[in-house]
C-alpha cells in the first residue's frame, strides 16, 4: 500500500464510519494536517473538504497533490491515517493491511518481488585485483 492509498483509505473510513468521538477527532486531525500540506492548492483543499465515501473519487481528486506536497511520506500524516484505520478496522490493522511500502521512486506496477539497492553504490573491482 502506498502512502496515498493509506491516506485515501483513512479519509474514506473516517468519512463513512459510524461517528464516535475518537474517530471524529482523528478524522478532523488528519484533515487538518492535510489542509496544511495542501496549502496553496485550492482545488485539492476543496476536494479534501468534499464529503466523499468512495476511494476512487478521493484518490482521483487528491492523489497527485498528496504526492506533490509530500503528504504521502509525512510520518505525522501517515500516523494520523493509521489512527483512523485502527479505530475503524482494527482487524485489518492487526493483519497488516495498512502497511505502507516504499518503492524508492520506482514507478509502475510490480508483479514480483523487487529489491532496491540501499546505500551508496559499490564501484566495480579494478581488473586483476579480484
Image: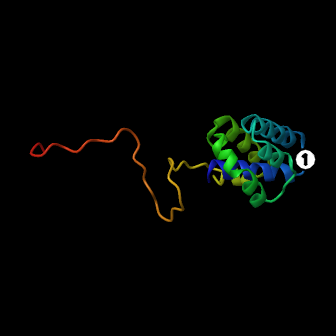
Q: Is residue 44 left or right of residue 70?
A: right
**What residue appears at the point 67 percent right and 50 percent down from the top-left corner?**
64
- Residue 103 percent coordinates (x, y): 52, 50
Dot 1, crowdedness within 10 Å: few (<14), some or many (≥20)?
A: few
Secondary structure category for the residue under label 1: loop
The residue sitting at 62% across, 51% down in the picture is: 2
Image height check: is 111 above or below 94?
A: below
> On the image, which quarter does residue 40 sit in?
top right
The outermost residue toward the bottom is: 111
Q: Which of 118 and 85 is in front in this view?
A: 118
Q: Does residue 113 sit above or below 4 in this rendering?
A: below
Which of the 4 image quadrants contains residue 16? bottom right
Q: Position of residue 55 (x, y in %)?
A: 76, 58
Residue 3 vertical position relative to residue 26 in the rendered view, above or below: below
| Residue at the (73%, 43%) spot, across then down | 81
Where the N terminus falls, by quadrant? bottom right
Residue extending farthest to the left is 128
Residue drawn at 77 percent across, 39 percent down: 30
Q: Position of residue 44 (x, y in %)?
A: 77, 46
User: What residue sits right under mark 1 in the picture?
Assistant: 19
Residue 11: horizontal and vertical position, in percent?
78, 49
Q: Is residue 25 above or below residue 99?
A: above
Q: How many labels does the image show?
A: 1
Give the quarter of the figure containing the C terminus. Answer: top left
Amino acid at each position: 500500500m502506498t502512502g496515498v492509498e493509506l491516506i485515501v483509505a483513512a479519509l474514506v473510513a473516517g468519512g463513512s464510519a459510524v461517528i464516535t468521538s475518537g474517530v471524529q477527532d482523528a478524522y478532523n486531525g488528519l484533515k487538518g494536517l492535510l489542509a496544511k500540506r495542501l496549502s496553496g492548492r485550492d482545488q485539492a483543499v476543496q476536494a479534501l473538504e468534499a464529503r466523499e465515501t468512495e476511494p476512487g473519487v478521493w484518490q482521483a481528486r487528491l492523489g497527485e497533490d498528496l504526492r506533490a506536497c509530500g503528504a504521502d511520506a509525512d510520518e505525522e500524516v501517515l500516523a494520523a491515517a493509521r489512527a483512523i484505520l485502527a479505530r475503524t478496522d482494527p482487524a485489518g490493522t492487526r493483519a497488516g493491511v495498512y502497511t505502507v511500502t516504499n518503492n524508492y521512486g520506482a514507478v509502475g506496477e510490480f508483479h514480483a518481488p523487487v529489491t532496491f539497492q540501499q546505500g551508496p553504490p559499490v564501484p566495480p573491482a579494478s581488473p586483476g585485483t579480484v
